[in-house]
Image (cartoon, rainbow, N blue to C red):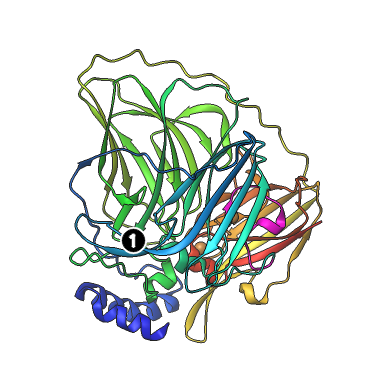
């Protein structure tokens, strides 16, 4: 691993090498000052030329004739891709693709996944946001990692509709950075029909790529240790950003957005069109809400309807700067995707249903807990903690099935952390939206109501952690034993 990293560094662009050296010195300073104010900026972004195409992603093929069973095969294996035109990048893939093919199913379906690991190291699959049985959750606490060359059969029933995703839960930071992630779309015939002409996925991520050679650098330098790996190239469905798609003025499109990046926050603003948020991490909201922008942490999902009013006009979804750690935020906006209205006359913009779903308020919490997210230097490197200890020293907290708990998530550090809970959903206090991942801003406290509701196989040990994957692997993870 060490040797590997050193070789990588040698091949990296001079600015990267330089960057790492500068950050190394600054890292020590930053710790002493107790903030991240001196963190050097990330490498400059690649701004691809506008290009045209489609948002279509391949689907996993369902080989089971039963309409209520979705049976698919996933293989994790190394592959070669072209993140940049005429450049070859090596990646780890599901079925040869980044993102992996989309799992499409409907609520209530039984899903069977025949998984094969063709990587040279152990891996697992975690179904982010789905309330699967504990033994299917893909963490090392509930299953043996699938060894190189090994197989595993995942099987679960879909309890929820919405937009979810899958990724490994072994060396998660490295394996996801190398390309192991894919989307899950669960529809529900009981939901109101939205007046849309398209239902499209935008799986967002980023890679640190050498623009000349196409080579991806996923080494863990001091800046990445602190902030998580951030790339210089934003990926939309595995391709470079600034993609143009064509529609007709007045038509609504549904965009299901997944932030699959290791560490990058996407603050998304739509310029020149209208954007209405209809769904979050776990399916529909109660009501549509028009929004100017969306802040999406790693792990979060959003469903929006977008339209352009006038023929010939375009709406551009842009990632605009967001400062998630004092002084260390990006400064550049990057165009993600453009929706271009053709010259055809506009259609009348259809009204949206006033109500999308009824979400019950939760019962009063039986327990209030405080979980403090922290960081400290230990043995010369930064470690991340929950209630002062890293994952290796955690003891599982105990929660009772069928109860609601109030969790006060306290961010004691100088940067934001996206908090994620496995196996159950929560509501932020004061809102009736189901979530599984939520931003905890630097130095702030957020209270969520965790709903430990029964579902098949709900008893067991479930993880909760920061979804900046380098923080998770760096110790900001713990367990809740639910029974
Ligand atoms: Cu997206 Cu522990 O996972
Ligand atoms: Cu998860
Ligand atoms: Cu974090």
In the rendered image, the quadrant that contains the C terminus is bottom right
Q: Quadrant of residue 19?
A: bottom left
| Residue at x-position 43% and y-position 23% | 196
Foreground: 171 or 56?
A: 56
Indicate left or right for 312 with 261 as reference.
left
Q: Is residue 389 visible?
A: no
Residue that badge 1 annotates: 207
Name the chief secondary structure element in magenta. Answer: loop
Q: Is residue 57 left or right of residue 10?
A: right
Q: Where is 11 relative to 128, above or below?
A: below
Which x, y percent locates residue 139? Answer: 63, 64
**Front-lying residue, 341 or 126:** 126
The span picked out in magenta is 127-141
Residue 250 versus residue 296: which sits nearer the camera? 250
In front: 372, or 124? 124
- Above or below: residue 480 compared with residue 239: below
The x, y position of residue 319, in whole percent, is 33, 46
The answer to whether residue 348 is above or below residue 172 is above
Q: Is residue 48 magenta?
A: no
Residue drawn at x 26%, y 53% as measured from the top left: 332
Q: CB of residue at label 1: within 8 Å of ligand 1?
A: no
Is the residue 60 above or below the residue 77 in the image?
Answer: above
Disc 1 is placed on an element classified as: strand
Residue visible at 25% across and 44% down in the picture:
242
């Amino acid at each position: 691993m060490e040797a590997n990293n050193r070789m990588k560094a040698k091949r990296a662009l001079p600015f990267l090498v330089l960057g790492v050296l500068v950050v190394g010195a600054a890292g020590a300073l930053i710790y002493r000052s107790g903030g991240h104010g001196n963190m050097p900026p990330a490498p400059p972004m690649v701004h691809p030329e506008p290009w045209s195409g489609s948002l279509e992603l391949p689907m996993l093929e369902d080989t089971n004739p039963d309409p209520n069973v979705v049976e698919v095969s996933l293989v994790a294996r190394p592959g070669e891709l072209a993140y940049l035109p005429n450049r070859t990048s090596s990646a780890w893939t599901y079925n040869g693709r980044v993102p992996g093919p989309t799992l499409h199913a409907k609520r209530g379906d039984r899903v069977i996944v025949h998984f094969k690991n063709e990587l040279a190291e152990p891996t697992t699959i975690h179904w982010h946001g789905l309330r699967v049985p504990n033994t299917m959750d893909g963490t090392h606490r509930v299953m043996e990692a699938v060894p190189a060359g090994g197989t595993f059969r995942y099987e679960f029933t879909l309890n929820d509709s919405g937009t979810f995703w899958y990724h490994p839960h072994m060396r998660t930071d490295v394996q996801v950075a190398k390309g192991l992630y894919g989307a899950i779309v669960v529809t529900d015939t009981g939901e109101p029909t939205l007046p849309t002409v398209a239902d499209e996925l935008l799986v967002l991520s980023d890679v640190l790529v050498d623009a000349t050679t196409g080579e991806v650098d996923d080494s863990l330098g001091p800046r990445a240790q602190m902030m998580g790996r951030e790339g210089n190239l934003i990926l939309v469905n595995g391709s470079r950003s600034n993609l143009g798609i064509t529609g007709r003025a007045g038509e609504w499109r549904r965009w299901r957005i997944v932030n699959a990046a290791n560490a990058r926050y996407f603050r998304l603003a739509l310029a020149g069109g209208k954007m209405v948020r209809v769904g979050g991490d776990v399916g529909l909201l109660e009501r549509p809400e028009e929004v100017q922008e969306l802040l999406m942490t790693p792990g979060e999902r959003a469903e929006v309807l977008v339209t352009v009013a006038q023929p010939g006009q375009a709406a551009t979804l842009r990632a605009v700067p967001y400062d998630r750690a004092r002084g260390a935020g990006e400064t550049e906006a990057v165009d993600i995707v453009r929706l271009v209205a053709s010259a055809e006359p506009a259609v009348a913009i259809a009204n949206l249903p006033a109500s999308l779903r009824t979400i019950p308020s939760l019962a009063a919490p039986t327990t209030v807990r405080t979980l403090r997210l922290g960081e400290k230097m230990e043995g010369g490197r930064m470690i991340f903690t929950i209630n002062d200890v890293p994952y290796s020293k955690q003891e599982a907290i105990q929660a009772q099935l069928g109860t609601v708990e109030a969790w006060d998530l306290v961010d004691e550090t100088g940067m934001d952390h996206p908090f994620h809970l496995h196996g159950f959903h929560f509501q932020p206090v004061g809102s009736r939206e189901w979530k599984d991942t939520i931003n905890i801003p630097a130095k702030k406290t957020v209270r969520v109501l965790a709903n430990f509701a029964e579902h098949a196989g709900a008893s067991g040990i479930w993880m909760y952690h920061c979804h900046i994957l380098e923080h998770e692997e760096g110790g900001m993870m713990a367990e809740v034993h639910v029974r």
